[in-house]
Amino acid sequence: MKNSLRYTLLAITILSTAIIGGRMYVLFQDDKLWGYLPLAFFLSAWASIVLLFWKKYTRHPKGLRWLGLSTLSGVLLAAGFPPSYFTPLMFIAWVPLLVVEHEISQQQESVGKWGLLGYAYYTFVLWNVLTTWWVGNTAFVAGIVAIWVNSILMWVPFLLFHHTKRVLPRLGYASFIVYWISFELLHLTWEFSWSWLTLGNAFARFPSWVQWYEYTGVFGGTLWILVANVLTFKILEKLKFQISPKRTLKEQRWPLVQVKLWVLVPFAVSLFMYFNQKDKGRDVEVVVVQPNFEPHYEKFDIPVQDQLRRFLRLSEEAVTDKTEYLVWPETSFNAGESGSLKENPIIKEVQFFLEKHPNLKLDAGVSAYKIFKPDEPHTRATREEETRNGPVFWEAYNAAIQLQSGADSIPFYIKSKLVPGPEITPYPQFFSWLKPLIDKLGGSIEGHGRQSYREAFASNSGRVAPVICYESIFGEYHTGYVKAGAEATFIMTNDGWWDNSAGHKQHLEFASLRAIETRRSIARSANTGISCFINQRGDILQPTKYGVEAAIRGTIKFNDKLTFYVKWGDLIGRIAVFTTAIFLLNTLSKGILKKAQA
């Protein structure tokens, strides 16, 4: 590309970024939503960065080819992810980037191992932007961090694979698979957790393809995708470097069969399981309410009594004498101090409603807090507030409760998988210097309180898992509710933060995977988004429309049988971590030995 053209394009992309950013600022000042503007902003900003570093990307004779292949991988990874219908693209999406890595490794002296950084990072940014741009609708800074920092984290296992392949060629592509699975497992467990793009989540739109998740969880899907990509790449590698076109069909017949078997056999097994899977357990009638309060500018500004009237009206319209459970969404109301829930006036009013329906149990997401007694130990989420009577120490909760007529106590569950940024500052001992910025953005350095164990709300109708929003994307974590006795899952969420984008659709479809893993029926209540029921094979039933108030009634099965995955969890992930440790030790020792011999 000539410099004049590059500078012209750079000027256009920078100007576009500024115009889009300005428009977003005006809408923000007018209390209006951004829609798809963050996607345009992030793409324009990334195009500007790429053009700024254009010479670095294209200084090698193959640089432009590598950039094109990296672009192709990023686009394919995004196109294969929900809510897209092009999921099969995931079986080849990594191949272009593997070609880039292979060609760079063949010309290591002229490129250097760090030359791979630019192309791999480019792929991961493109994938993150095209798939999770909607995070910017929640909090713009959080969107930037989620996309660009997560891309850096993705680059780490890919660079380790590149290094292992150079030092131990026979373990090269096996290391790619185990390093990536280990990275995904880490992303499920540490406080920077952003496991939205776990590869196994890609099949959420088609639950009939992955019924065997009841044995493997999502890491079975990740393994399925990665092995298919490696097998496909190995065929292309041989076509290009080892055999003549005249011998192609003969010599590649068996590798092609391997790829087909690897992809089609699990698919066929899953379809067989899907059509033979019957929901197990006893019938329970459940009503789910979607009040539809826009969270940015309505939910926390409309008077509480006005909101409660809508909740009760929608509930009364749908509840029957046979209804055993009523489900309200995340942060339906403020329950006040956790130690005095029964004195809360809203809870008293709801209890009056429940007295008219003595068989009914209400499971609702609430906001709450706890005030620490003088001699009570504090937690990392403890906040201090000065009052006329001295300092008060307290912590905030995103929680769930279960109310029923005549109950002696109110079960109280505290959300424990918190969203990095809005609900928790990861490792605050290292990031306390960010407190002024975090406070300005509406968060807190202390974050929310958590509880260390999962629990199930029990009643005379059974035991249910009170899953709150972000918690529904964590597979093994979700099995903790089932081990605590949950026979069904109630998901309480507020997906309107992302506007009407792919975000709320992805979040909904991921819940289908939890149903398969645990074989537990799901009732899902969204403040706005999509509320629904999900059966034990992952089918989404009676989905509501985005942006409308609704109440739906359905009958779900309460099941007490435990699946293999519930008993053993992310076994594939743990095996990958163990193998990763062995591979890295071998890579390190072999690398040291080679340097000593040089």
Image (tube, helix red, strand yellow):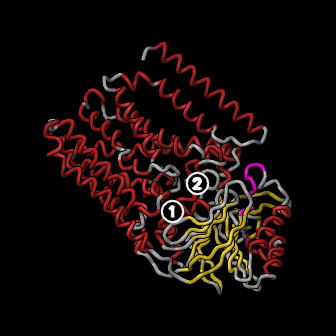
In the image: residue 526, left or right of residue 121: right
| Magenta-span inclusion, residue 471 | no
* Element assignment for label 1: loop
What residue is at 38 percent from the left and 66 percent from the top?
270
Q: Amino acid at mark 2?
A: Lys
Q: Say which label, 2 or 1, has the lower sequence index.
A: 1
Looking at the rendering, the stretch of residues picked out in magenta corresponds to: 290-297
Q: Position of residue 135 (x, y in %)?
A: 60, 46
Q: Position of residue 515 (x, y in %)?
A: 51, 69
Can the viewer see residue 229 in this picture? yes
Main SS of the magenta part reads loop
Q: Position of residue 118 (x, y in %)?
A: 40, 33
Q: Amino acid at mark 1?
A: Phe
| Magenta-span inclusion, residue 293 | yes
Task: Assign the C terminus to one quadrant of the image.
Answer: top left
The residue pinned by badge 1 equals: 474
Seen from the viewer's position, the closer of residues 284 and 134 is 284
Can the viewer see residue 570 in this picture? no
The residue pinned by badge 2 equals: 505
Q: Is residue 366 above or below residue 83?
A: below
In the image: residue 361, left or right of residue 309: left
Residue farthest top in this picture: 4
What residue is at 61 percent from the left and 61 percent from the top?
469
Q: Position of residue 453 (x, y in %)?
A: 55, 72
What residue is at 65 percent from the left and 55 percent from the top?
495
* Element assignment for label 2: helix
